[in-house]
Image (cartoon, helix red, strand yellow):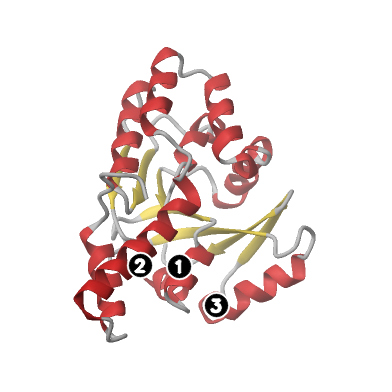
Amino acid sequence: MKKNLEFSNDAVARIKSKLSEKGLGEKGIDKALKKELYEIHSNYYKKFSYAKAINELKKSSGLNVHERLLKKYDPNRFIVLKELYQKIFEITGKPKVLIDLACGLNPLTLPWMNLSKDCKYYCYDLEQGLINFLNEYFRIIKKDYEAFLNDALSNPPSIKSDVCLLFKSTPCFEWQSPKSTALLLEKINADYIVISVMLRGEKNIQGTRNYLNSIIGEFIKGKETHEIILKKEYFLIIKTMKG
């Protein structure tokens, strides 16, 4: 794991509580805790250097730098950007408040979001280095957006939003705690929630639908839903009826 990583206290407490039920002892719990946090973090950022990315962005925050960073660190996200947000906002309407939960590097797709000037954009993730990077990134691009340290599974933000993005996080949530995604969705205070997962097999759309239904079927029952399929990624838009 990268040195000096600092995770949300809520995340540490949640994982420790789960591990304590396994009778591992204090040293065993600490070792297992570090391993689980590593697994969560390394899936997304093990080759990402916050400092190098900031230096690149300080030299130029133009579209070409965003493209280069996304192509290198999140190529699957990059290949759907030309269509993604237009298709989402055609269904949800352009948000006045947009939440990016378990956001990872998705804020780097801001140039393609085409948000309204008065839109409030809030990002949440569980590792402090990422949050520091995102807030510095917002300063560089001169946007009044904010990123916050947060463990979605134990303490999701209560702020009301028009749209909440939850991209590619479900498998990680379910690995940590089965059925945790459904519990999280109940707590999110948004008019629309947009979940994405990579297709289970390059073209296995039905398998992906079945997977999501097995973990959030009760939550979406009776709700208006829309699906968008772009390349290898499946997006489910859920109208929550909380508006």
Q: Along the horizontal axis of the image, is 238 left or right of 137?
A: right
Q: Along the horizontal axis of the image, is 72 left or right of 25?
A: right
Q: Which residue has dot 3 on it?
A: 215
Q: Is residue 208 visible?
A: yes
Q: Nearer the viewer, residue 16 or 65?
A: 16
Mark 1 or mark 3: whose residue is earlier in sequence: 1
Q: Is residue 221 visible?
A: no
Q: Which residue has dot 2 on it?
A: 153
Residue 228 in the image, given as x and y percentages of width and height: 69, 55
Disc 2 versus disc 3: distance between alpha carbons?
15 Å
Which amino acid is tagged 1?
A: Phe
Residue 107 in the image, given as x and y percentages of width and height: 45, 38
Disc 1 versus disc 2: distance between alpha carbons?
8 Å
Rendered residue at 42%/59% (across/down): 40
Residue 117 in the image, given as x and y percentages of width and height: 41, 29
Q: Tag 3: Cα neighbours inside 10 Å, few (<14), some, or many (≥20)?
A: some
Is disc 1 in contact with disc 2, using a CB cutoff of under 8 Å? yes
Q: Which residue has dot 1 on it?
A: 173
Compared to residue 78, the image places residue 196 above or below, namely below
